Image: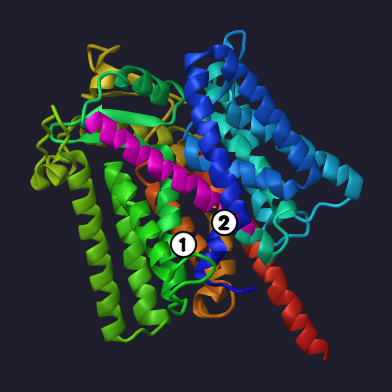
Amino acid sequence: MNFSPSIFFGKYFRIAFLGVCVVEFLSFFGFLYPALNIFAFLVIIGVTFLLSYRRLLYGAMIVLAELAVASKGYLFSLPLGRFDLSLRLGIFLVVMLAWVLHVIRSRSARFYPSTFFIPYCVVVFFMILSVVLAYFHGNPLGNIFFDMNGYLFFALAAPFVDAIRSKKDVVAVLQVIVAAVSVSIMKTLFLLFIFSQQFTVVLPDVYTWVRRTGVGEITQLENFTRVFFQSHIYAIFFGLLLFTFLLFTPYVKRENGHSWWSVFVRGAFALLVVFVSYSRSFWVGAVITIVFLYGLFVFVWKFSWKKIGLITATLALVALFDFGFVLGLVNFPLPMRSVNVSARGLITDRTEDVTTEAAGASRFQLLGPLLTAATRHAILGSGFGTTVTYKTHDPRALANNPDGLYTTFSFEWGYLDLWLKLGIFGLIAYLYFLGRILVAAWPFFRQPHDDGNKIVVGIMLGFVSVLLIHTTTPFLNHPLGIGWILFSLAVIEVYNKKERQTHGTKSTS
């Protein structure tokens, strides 16, 4: 296979890009016309099942594309009494059903002999134990369900491994992810533009659509309009993948309609929306991942200081381009409109008073009570749905709790959340499972120039970033993070299988 920049923009990219654009338009009009929402939901679920049954790989593609654009999974929903079945849960159910039918038909499941199977089963055991303990601790059933339903995505490990069987499959899935993230980038910049320029005719409907579908938040800060999607974490994965790929791919002026520079610009726009998200957790996670990358430059890949300096200068230019583009977009001169956002204001809205600003302060105020709660049942945990009460200054919480006391089972401190719910043994089991994936990927870090190893490195850098971001913004208990973890696992299975076959051939020749 030719691992040139054009591999990201093949037929699956084109189909997925068009498909995701259509889905976004249908979602907006489905919000305006509920009957269309229900019709589109049923059509998407039906098509997903038929495609997944035909070839399980298509189901994996749809799952990951939905994660990359939909944050909470409610681009469409099906009202069932008091419960709204999200598109994400519907896709999950039909892909699982298609996988079960595949297993019955083939009488085999590739995940069973995997080196990750036992660690995975141990993590699942602690998740089941957490449900049991939650019930015996008297946690409300509603809290238990809504707290643990994100973990249901762990069940997709076997379907992903069965679906993604070759390097061609990996590239096909990446094309779909690249397409979905590309649409997400376009949507983010469109929202930033219309809200910064205050197109009041469409803003109420667009804002309500974004909030009701759970895609993200649009917040007017002192100097800037923040457009934040939880799924922007996939823009981090996307940017790291493209950056790593270009790092080890010889410069090609143009091939199959795509140049080296066109891929570079797409990576720059991916990091641009991470900036626009104004998520300090995303910023810190991305920066620390890049620091980790520099460690690889020096200690593993033995880059010359000249090359490291060139890479640093390039990253600095990307940062300046992104900053300048955003500044120009929000200040774009239009007739009858006057917007004046300063360069300094773009930075200070999220970098000043980190510990006293409402959201940041609330996170630190939660830390003490959460630690206390975690140590209450430190060994086996308190179970899903366990609540903690703490004092907050977050305006969203104060709207319903004037005394400032806020009770929730959803916490920003991700690893403390895991300790509280799964216990210290459950946390260790989860970390061991993640560590096994990292250890299995390490040989590919040592030889990033070989064949498609650079793709593994790029994917695993996204894996590292989600582990870092989870510290202050939980993703390892959310489909967005779990989806990338399981995709990484499936990719490692493909490449390790290839390595084993190669070594086996050499030993018998």
Please tell me whether residue 61 is drawn above or below residue 489 in the rendered image.
Answer: above
Where is residue 39 shown, x and y percent of the image?
Answer: 64, 19
Separation (CA) of disc 2 from disc 1: 10 Å
Where is residue 161 shown, x and y percent of the image?
Answer: 71, 54
- In the rendered image, which residue does mark 2 sit on? 174
Quadrant (top left, top right, bottom left, bottom right) of the N terminus: bottom right
The residue positioned 26% from the left and 85% from the top of the image is 306
Which numbered circle lies on residue 241?
A: 1
Q: Earlier in the sequence, mark 2 or mark 1?
A: 2
Amino acid bearing label 1 = Leu
Please tell me whether residue 401 is drawn above or below residue 391 in the rendered image.
Answer: above
Answer with left or right where residue 466 lies relative to residue 79.
Answer: left
The residue positioned 56% from the left and 31% from the top of the image is 148
Answer with left or right where residue 249 lies relative to residue 127.
Answer: left
Q: Quadrant of residue 334?
A: top left
**Most foreground residue, 21 or 230:** 21
Amino acid bearing label 2 = Leu
